[in-house]
Amino acid sequence: MTLKVKRCLICLCALLLLLNFSATGIVTAARAQVAPPLLMLKDGDLYSWSVEGKALTRLTEYGFHRRPVLSPDGRTVAFNSWTQAAVDAIRSQRFSAEDGDFPSDIILLDIVTRQQQTIAGQPADISLAGSVKSAVSRSNPTWSPDGQALAWTEVLWSADGTEISYQLAVYHLASAQTTYAPLPAPILKKDEGVRTIRAMWGSGGIAMYIPRKNPNTPGALRELYIFNADATPKQIITLEDSYYDFMWVRDGAKDYIGVLYFSKPWTLIDPETTQTSPMNGTPEMYEPGSDRYSIFVTAKMNGAQVAGLQWSAASAVAQKVEPLKFQAETNFAHRITVSPQGIAYVLDAVYVWQDGNLTKIDGTADIARGWTDGEAGAIVWGATAWRVRH
């Protein structure tokens, strides 16, 4: 056997050995599963932080991005971003928060490559000079459970600025196409301006709470609208007056809409039949892929009224449950999150809880700006879901 043939055989054996190790998962960093970093919105830009590095890394350079939402596979972040025309109008004092939600775009950011893609922009004839014309304001996006689509709601201003309309948008990643469905106009609070409608996607569809004028009484119709993945209508559910929030929540093997009230027991609604049943437990945020950590809420009562919520952290590995200083309603759940590596939440800074140990992240002081901006201080760390804790 010649020396050249021997060398070829040695190289071939080494290659086969490496392939075998790669197939069994013993080697290869390329295939290793890397835990997603903790992502946060700070001063209008996205930053990341990891348990290993313990330093903030700036991911964007714009200053007018909004709340990030993470894809189920942990690779892609979607977020709302004020469009450049709105930023210019704000700087020239031609537009303010009193006018409502600013015209905005929807952007995708690949966490690994840091490449950005705008999947929903503005009409070419947008104008914010004196009045809003041909502009689109968008809600924060929400991911489909399979990570193949996103949904958000839109407020559309007419070309002459005299009319507005509402619609649901569903963007399909594979085709890069968007499907739309009209929505009824919600009741606008006095002096609040025009606001978008929050959408939440769960296994039973895309759900939105829309308070509307009641034609028969002076009060409001408090309605929950559910749409299918193709943006076709599915259900309209009437809620009671003391409603204050909802979420997709799993109880056992079935998914429901959990409805939280101020002055009556919390309930579960079947999205297929609209049948209502008691929530015999309390909402718990968890990470479906690992279930090592979770966060649950219990009601603090003032007589028959819910006076607030107590948030508590739980570690399955350490068998530890501990109350957190975090205080907010569930509609501020974008300031508390869970992952296989720990629990993070926002107070005067971002804190990480791990098995009873608390770490304050350097460089995050005043991240929530005194809580005056409802979007400031938004964080996300892995894919999360809600279930009923019994």
Image (spheres, helix red, strand yellow):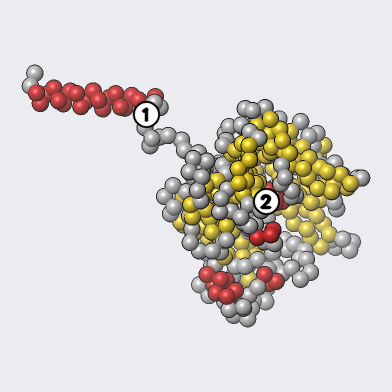
Please tell me which residue lies in front, 314 or 176.
314
Three-letter code, disc 1: Val
User: Residue 350: in sight, yes or no?
Assistant: yes
Q: Earlier in the sequence, mark 2 or mark 1?
A: 1
User: Residue 151: in sight, yes or no?
Assistant: no
Does residue 184 appear left or right of residue 18 in this picture?
right
User: For mark 1, what is the residue?
Assistant: 27
Does residue 45 appear left or right of residue 187 in this picture?
left
Please tell me which residue lies in front, 201 or 344.
344
Q: CA distance from mark 2 to mark 1?
A: 41 Å
| In the rendered image, the vertical position of residue 18 relative to residue 102, given as above or below | above
Does residue 250 appear left or right of residue 303 in this picture?
left
Where's residue 93, x and y in %? 62, 78
Question: In this view, which residue lies farthest toward the left?
Answer: 2
Three-letter code, disc 2: Leu
At horizontal 73% and vertical 39% (from top left) the residue drawn is 323
Mark 2 is surrounded, within 10 Å at the Cα level, by few (under 14), some (14 to 19) or many (20 or more) other residues, namely: many
Which quadrant of the view contains residue 290?
Answer: top right
